[in-house]
Amino acid sequence: MAEVRTRVSVPVRFADGYSATAEVFTFTGLADGKEHLALGLGDWRAAAAEGRALVRPHSECLTGDVFGSERCDCGPQLREAVERIATAGGLLLYLRQEGRGIGLYAKLDAYALQDAGLDTYEANVALGRGEDERDYTAAAQMLEALGVDRIRLLSNNPDKALQLDALGIGIVEQVATGVHLSRANVRYLTSKRDRTRHTLELPLAG
């Protein structure tokens, strides 16, 4: 079983001026041995005790989260999630699963293939990888270590709900994130909607 190893308060501030204070947790015993983080935001303990904690499993995206890449919607989703979770009370799980689990360099290789005409899933497969290699076992372990077994899941991705439910985390509600559409990511978001049934309304994508 995973256990909390460190807890520390971290004030966070985004480029648009929004700020919040996160209770950041690190863990031992996670199944994949990676350095995932849980950020407790708002009155997350009260929300968890009442079975209404808003939780977003957010996969690391260096290009989007740090550099503001518009090829994906990861950066805006992270910003949105922090504010919504801080308001409602809950947890952001920051998962070290770059490129849907294939890693940073492979993700950039996939970008090159996308520039040649493949969609985001076809590019992963062309590299000999799975369309989506993410596993949420560690996410479930983190929640269990924090005493959270029922959540409101902040995600458009049905696979996250299916995996977490199978791992013993009760999904009280699946809450859709906003749609962060730009000219640079229309094709990317359309692929997510059409290939993996993400709950996305894309007026510019047809």
Image (tube, rainbow, N blue to C red):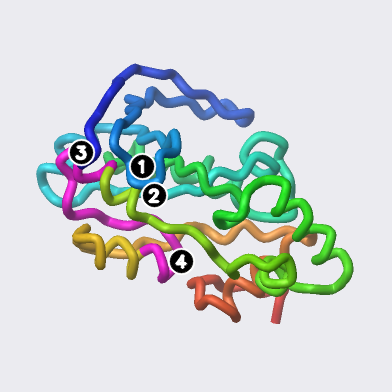
Q: Residue at x 31, y 33 (%)?
A: 40
Q: Residue at x 73, y 45 (%)?
A: 69
Q: Which residues are magenta?
A: 142-160
**Disc 2 to disc 1, how far (Cα)?**
8 Å
Q: Amino acid at mark 1?
A: Ile
Mark 3 surroundings within 10 Å by alpha-carbon count, few (fewer than 14), some (14 through 19), many (20 or more): some
Q: Nearer the viewer, residue 102 or 51?
A: 102
What number is the disc on residue 56? 2
Disc 3 vs disc 2: which is toward the camera? Answer: 3
Q: Which quadrant of the figure contains the N terminus? A: top left
Disc 4 vs disc 3: which is toward the camera? Answer: 3
Mark 4 surroundings within 10 Å by alpha-carbon count, few (fewer than 14), some (14 through 19), many (20 or more): some
Asked whether 37 falls inside the magenta stretch, the response is no
Q: Nearer the viewer, residue 15 or 48?
A: 48
Residue 140 x, y percent position in the rendering: 28, 51
Mark 2 or mark 1: name the one nearer the start of the chain. Answer: 2
Q: Residue at x 18, y 45 (%)?
A: 148
> Which residue bears the numbered disc 3?
145
**Element type where label 2 sits in the image:** strand
> Which residue bears the numbered disc 4?
157
Mark 1 surroundings within 10 Å by alpha-carbon count, few (fewer than 14), some (14 through 19), many (20 or more): many
Q: Kindly indicate whether the residue at mark 2 contacts the one at mark 3 (C-beta within 8 angstroms).
A: no
**Disc 4 to disc 2, how far (Cα)?**
11 Å
**Element type where label 1 sits in the image:** helix
> Which residue bears the numbered disc 1?
85
Q: Amino acid at mark 2?
A: Arg
**Element type where label 4 sits in the image:** loop
Q: Is residue 11 left or right of residue 3?
A: right
Residue 174 x, y percent position in the rendering: 33, 64
**Disc 3 to disc 2, how far (Cα)?**
16 Å
